């Protein structure tokens, strides 16, 4: 399928955007700001073009911002609505273009800078996920846990440049995008793509969406840390992004003008978007898909070796998790605010509501925990999970209610209390945070959505549109089914070909040592010094006792001392190779 903007010749000039449609035969209706204005096929100079805004949208839709292009397209518009024998068409077009929309279709430097900065914030979230997860695992697995997030980002970014962006956002072709933008061909740094963002370069939009794609498999990694084979993980990320994430992104977000089989120009969107599903910044595409994928992957890979679920391990570094949460919260402002794709009121509202949702999620989790403990104590680590749940829930909406931070905390907290009874080992509770939070947030969007906040969205059930809740429910069911089944099939394929999990011995030694030959912290030297000092103290005490003994018993004492000293273990090269030391 080729884009309508690629057409040559006035007879093919046919535009369709959510704002405006002007067909060449003038037989249908023009859509201006959601209202229908009938065409008149008679002799007036214009057909309802007094609303200059519609012309500006038209120009922006198919121009690069250069005035000669604007003028050319304006001439096409005027020609299509002015009687054929009229004169002065070019002059008339020039006046309309120069007087009424001189900046139509131009790249806005403020919007461009804003989206570039937002993309940088979203990028920070990927290593932030590594820190967040790394602080919660056992110390012998910290480095590998952080590595899995970085590795996922590296794989996805290359895949995105090769064909991922084209499949996700290219023109509709058999349910997914086509290959026209493979290798980022024709993804311009100078021109915009008005189908998605008319005021920023197309390349900037692609870069912003790439950061979303990169963080999604990084989220999944938390479910399988401490046991997943590194090579298998890299292959899984590539396949999962190509076969699960990219199609979902197309269904929910993609849209563009293209020629159909009959030669007519149509504005074709992903089928969930066409139904009216609302996903402002990735509640379904990112969080539900990653949460369900985490559940499916953890079921297939199995549980960790000799892990005691009734007595959880001590986290390696809660401050690491605090750092990760802080960076996630910081980056989420760009995650949601940047999804407005312009530095305007919607971005400001999304950024503010993101912060409020995170804070309310934190406080809600804290209050629930305090109530359960009868006011005696509250888990800081648990409250950090509340922050993430609030952030996840607000993502599909990003402009509606403080309740998005409060409500999802309850089901997530309750389900986590029964985690040890469930038949799967989701190491770091990815399903409970992202899966549950994303589902609740998406359904709440179907209730609270209002066009007063985002005119581009539909009203929700609480604003007179009960159908929107049904659409959101369908989007959730489709995402759960597609991500769950797709992930399970991929994981089973890899399990019975190259294997998913490292050996029990490798798990006991630690993933850092097994996969990287490195360690997250340099505690070996300190441990060796303590071990040597301890041995010296034992030797000194043994000698002191021996000198107080009689000559006849001294010989026996020396022999006993030698036996005891032989039983003292020498300094071990790593304090994490024994399960007992690790659990201590």
Image: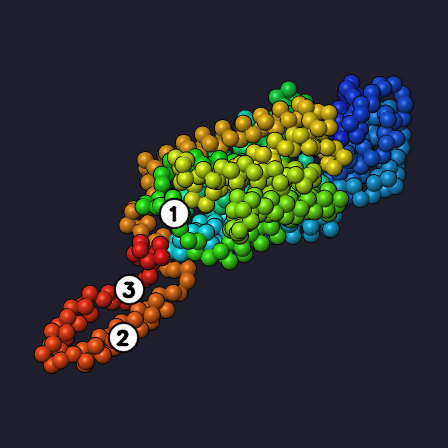
Between 205 and 288, which is closer to the camera in this rendering? 288
Q: Name the residue under label 1.
A: 311
Q: How far apart are marks 1 and 2 (CA)?
A: 35 Å
Residue 536 bears which disc, if any? 2
Q: Which of marks 3 and 2 is nearer the N terminus?
A: 2
At a point 31% along the width and 51% down the height, the residue shown is: 508
Tell whether 217 sits left or right of 401: left
| 27 in relation to 557, above or below | above
**Residue 357: image location, x then y, percent:** 64, 44
Q: Name the residue under label 3.
A: 572
| 210 in relation to 441, above or below | below
Tag nearer the camera, 1 or 3: 1
Between 533 and 233, which is closer to the camera in this rendering? 533
Binning the other alpha carbons within 10 Å of mark 1 as few (below 14), some (14 to 19) or many (20 upward) gives: few
At a point 44% along the width and 39% down the height, the residue shown is: 419
Query: Marks 3 and 1: in contact by CB < 8 Å?
Result: no
Q: In which quarter of the image is the C terminus?
A: bottom left
Q: How far apart are marks 1 and 3 (CA)?
A: 26 Å
**Residue projecting furthest to the left:** 552
């Amino acid at each position: 399928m080729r884009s309508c903007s690629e057409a040559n010749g006035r007879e093919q000039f046919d535009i369709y955007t959510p704002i405006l449609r002007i067909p060449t035969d003038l037989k249908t209706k023009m859509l201006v700001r959601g209202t229908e204005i009938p065409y008149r096929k008679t002799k007036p100079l214009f057909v309802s073009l007094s609303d200059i805004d519609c012309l500006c949208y038209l120009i922006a839709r198919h121009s690069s911002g250069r005035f000669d292009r604007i003028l050319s397209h304006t001439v096409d518009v005027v020609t299509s609505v002015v009687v054929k024998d009229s004169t002065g068409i070019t002059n008339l077009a020039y006046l309309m273009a120069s007087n009424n929309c001189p900046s139509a279709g131009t790249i806005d430097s403020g919007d461009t800078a804003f989206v570039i900065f937002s993309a940088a914030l979203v990028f920070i979230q990927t290593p932030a996920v590594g820190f967040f997860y790394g602080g919660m695992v056992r110390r012998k697995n910290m480095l590998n846990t952080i590595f899995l997030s970085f590795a996922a980002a590296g794989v996805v970014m290359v895949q995105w440049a090769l064909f991922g962006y084209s499949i996700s956002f290219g023109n509709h072709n058999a349910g997914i995008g086509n290959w026209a933008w493979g290798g980022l061909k024709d993804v311009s740094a100078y021109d915009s793509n008005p189908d998605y963002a008319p005021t920023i370069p197309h390349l900037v939009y692609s870069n912003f969406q790439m950061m979303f794609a990169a963080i999604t498999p990084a989220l999944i990694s938390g479910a399988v840390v401490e046991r997943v084979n590194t090579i298998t993980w890299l292959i899984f990320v590539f396949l999962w992004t190509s076969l699960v994430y990219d199609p979902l992104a197309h269904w929910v977000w993609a849209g563009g003008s293209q020629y159909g089989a009959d030669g007519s120009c149509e504005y074709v969107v992903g089928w969930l978007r066409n139904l009216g599903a609302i996903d402002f910044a990735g509640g379904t595409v990112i969080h539900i898909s990653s949460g369900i994928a985490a559940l499916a992957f953890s079921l297939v890979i199995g549980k960790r070796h000799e892990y005691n679920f009734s007595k959880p391990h001590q986290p390696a570094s809660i401050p690491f998790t605090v750092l990760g949460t802080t960076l996630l919260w910081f980056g989420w402002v760009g995650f949601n605010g940047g999804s407005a794709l312009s530095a305007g009121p919607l971005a400001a509202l999304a950024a503010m509501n993101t912060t409020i949702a995170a804070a309310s999620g934190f406080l809600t989790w804290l209050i629930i925990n305090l109530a359960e403990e009868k006011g005696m104590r509250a888990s800081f680590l648990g409250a950090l999970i509340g922050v993430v749940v609030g952030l996840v829930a607000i993502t599909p909406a990003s402009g509606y209610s403080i309740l998005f931070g409060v409500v999802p905390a309850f089901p997530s907290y309750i389900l986590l209390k029964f985690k040890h009874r469930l038949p799967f080992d989701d190491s770091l509770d990815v399903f409970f945070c992202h899966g549950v939070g994303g589902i609740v947030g998406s359904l709440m969007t179907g209730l609270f959505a209002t066009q007063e906040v985002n005119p581009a969205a539909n009203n929700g059930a609480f604003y007179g549109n009960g159908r929107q809740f049904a659409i959101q429910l369908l989007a959730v069911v489709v995402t759960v089914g597609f991500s769950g089944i797709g992930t399970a099939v991929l994981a089973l394929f890899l399990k019975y070909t190259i294997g998913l999990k490292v050996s029990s011995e490798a798990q006991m030694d630690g993933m850092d040592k097994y996969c990287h030959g490195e360690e997250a912290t340099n505690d070996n030297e300190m441990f060796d010094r303590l071990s040597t000092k301890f041995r010296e103290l034992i030797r000194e005490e043994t000698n002191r006792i021996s000198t107080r003994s009689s000559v006849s018993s001294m010989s026996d004492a020396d022999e006993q001392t030698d036996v005891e000293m032989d039983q003292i273990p020498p300094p071990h090269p790593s304090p994490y190779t024994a399960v007992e030391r690790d659990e201590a």
